[in-house]
Amino acid sequence: VSQSRRLGGDAGTRVAVVGAGSWGTAFACHLTSCGLATTLLARRPEQAESLRRHHRNPDYLPFLDLPPDLAYGTYPRTDFASFALLALAVPSKAYTEVLRSIAPRLPRGVRILSLTKGLEPSTHKRFSEVLQFELAALEPMVAVLSGPNHAEEVAMGQPTATVIASADQEHAQALQELVGNERLRTYVNSDLIGIELAGAVKNVVALATGMSDGLGYGDNARAALITRGLAEIARLGTALGAESRTFAGLAGLGDLVGTCTSRHSRNRLAGELIAQGHVPSRVEEEMGMVAEGLTAAQAVLALAREHGVEMPITENVVAVLFEGKDVRASVRDLMARQLRPESL
Amino acid sequence: VSQSRRLGGDAGTRVAVVGAGSWGTAFACHLTSCGLATTLLARRPEQAESLRRHHRNPDYLPFLDLPPDLAYGTYPRTDFASFALLALAVPSKAYTEVLRSIAPRLPRGVRILSLTKGLEPSTHKRFSEVLQFELAALEPMVAVLSGPNHAEEVAMGQPTATVIASADQEHAQALQELVGNERLRTYVNSDLIGIELAGAVKNVVALATGMSDGLGYGDNARAALITRGLAEIARLGTALGAESRTFAGLAGLGDLVGTCTSRHSRNRLAGELIAQGHVPSRVEEEMGMVAEGLTAAQAVLALAREHGVEMPITENVVAVLFEGKDVRASVRDLMARQLRPESL
């Protein structure tokens, strides 16, 4: 291991989080608890100023006191050269745009940890692909973090386990040491395809289980949907080159279960609201939060069709969201499919 | 298919359920909704009389009106010759004893559908093995039913999917037609070992997730435990000859998720109570319900040791239940193990 690849972790190592939504804010709190000199970067100066003044993020994590040693800034103005690590936590829809806007200020060999779960909406690429493509000239070191990691619980230091995936195992292991502690257990994985697809598709399945909940169906229906959902995720993933065992792990099964059964999940909640009659196109605005499944659903379905993979849950979610299909008919159609022999 | 192997399903086909706890009662309601002439058999005459008079089972399903056409009896006195199917829903602890007591009254070639999830406590045998052994002279047709099937929801006709497993696929398919409908979707599977082990061990994992909940840990910790729990179940199962894909199905992952995340789950609740300081040996009495995981834990651990399989969750649950280990230390030990690379 060359010295230049070592990633410190000494007190004072400077790291930045781009995006001050709930996950970015929570992860910045976590990085601070790892002893890292952390700067949370919002988009607008007023937002950074409000965070700095009140040590609160009332829009996204209203009940949380932010740690006093967390610093704030704005990513449109920051010079990124002095940071040992850049964590990206911006919504899927804005990811490429934000990346392009900061790229001219990123150093050569920049270390990136991507926290966003989803696919690039127009190209259907995974975000590690987007990073490698957009930053090719900088030869970035790219990793993604994914797992059953509700922001609120990570921010509060509740016991959590997660996965850091990278094609560069040294980078992944350096990050494991840097951002893991006894509250956030991290382990490394090299299957970027599997980890990133699982993180994107699980939000679509969570919309479906939310719809089932919203119709008043119970835990039995939800467990059946989760089971078929994981099979659907694994089918797409392996068709795209992922390892099937990834889907039995924390970033596959673990994250799916966490998202589909949690009171914290926005995607589950969005599905519930839609089943109760809210208009799909207005649900994010009503919640005041991004539900990534709403953006991911069409990209996932496009990938599935491109690769000839059957994804009945995703199909039904897209039909409800964008084609006016009745929610009850969709969930009934999904349950009816259970009669076929199970296949992975 | 010989005529003698056909199983009717015509209105008037008589079926019996042995055991009037919550699952037996719920399944009897379901069988009635399939148009089968169903008799629910309790142990004591007073219990049968109370069910017959009030159409209620106040101890187990207090909010449910039992269907008017459900008949009642007592299994210590019933002549079983006229029933086309016998569904067994007695607790693990009493299973062999009840079976031996009714065996002299069972017809040759008796069709049995076993509903109990667990292992025979003293021999650690699966119940399909117990049935084949105890009834060998009768050449019984044996199947088991397992899946994410909370009794309350099945009784109310909520959408549910389940698995019928048998070494005899004709028997399984006949049962699929007989007991499946649009509310309870059934599918068949031949992997008895996998289906029965999953049904037994998931209750042990549910105790562990209940303990995590009871300590105030969140959805992230629970998702991690469920993920490691399924890996643990699959390790034991495949060591005993099960097919690994069974554990990704409804009776594996599906049932595990259902049990570990449901408000209805007694095993999850038992774990929660124990974490809050209730004495393990008195929890079933306090709940007024059987929590099968309390019986299964030691049998599962014995099987694991016999086959050299590592089962850290089961080990920790047994240590808490029977060796006085501190719950907090156990859950901490389990979370700490996440740092190792994942293995199935």
Image (cartoon, coloured by chain):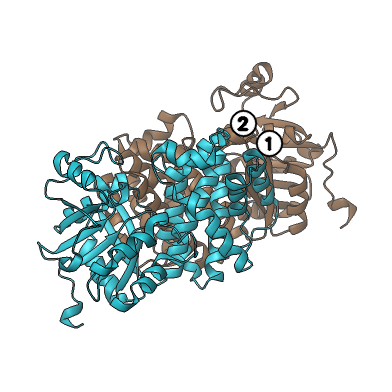
Chain colours: A brown, B cyan
Amino acid type at mark 1: Val
Is residue B209 found left or right of A137 in the rendered image? left
What whole-number distance in Å separates the C-alpha atoms at marks 2 and 1?
A: 8 Å
The residue that appears at 32% across and 36% down in the rendered structure is: A279
Is residue B128 found left or right of A59 in the rendered image? left
Have a look at marks 2 and 1 and say if they share a chain. yes
Q: Are marks 2 and 1 in contact (CB under 8 Å)?
A: yes
Q: Position of residue A62 (x, y in %)?
A: 55, 23
SS for dot 2 = loop
Q: Which mark is residue A20?
A: 2
Q: Which residue is mark 1?
A: A17
Q: Chain of mark 2?
A: A
Amino acid type at mark 2: Ala
Front residue of A254 and B254: B254
Q: Which mark is residue A275?
A: none
In the image, farthest residue toward the bottom: B2
Mark 1 residue crowding within 10 angstroms, few (<14) / some (14–19) / many (20+) = many
SS for dot 1 = strand
Residue A261 picture quarter: top left
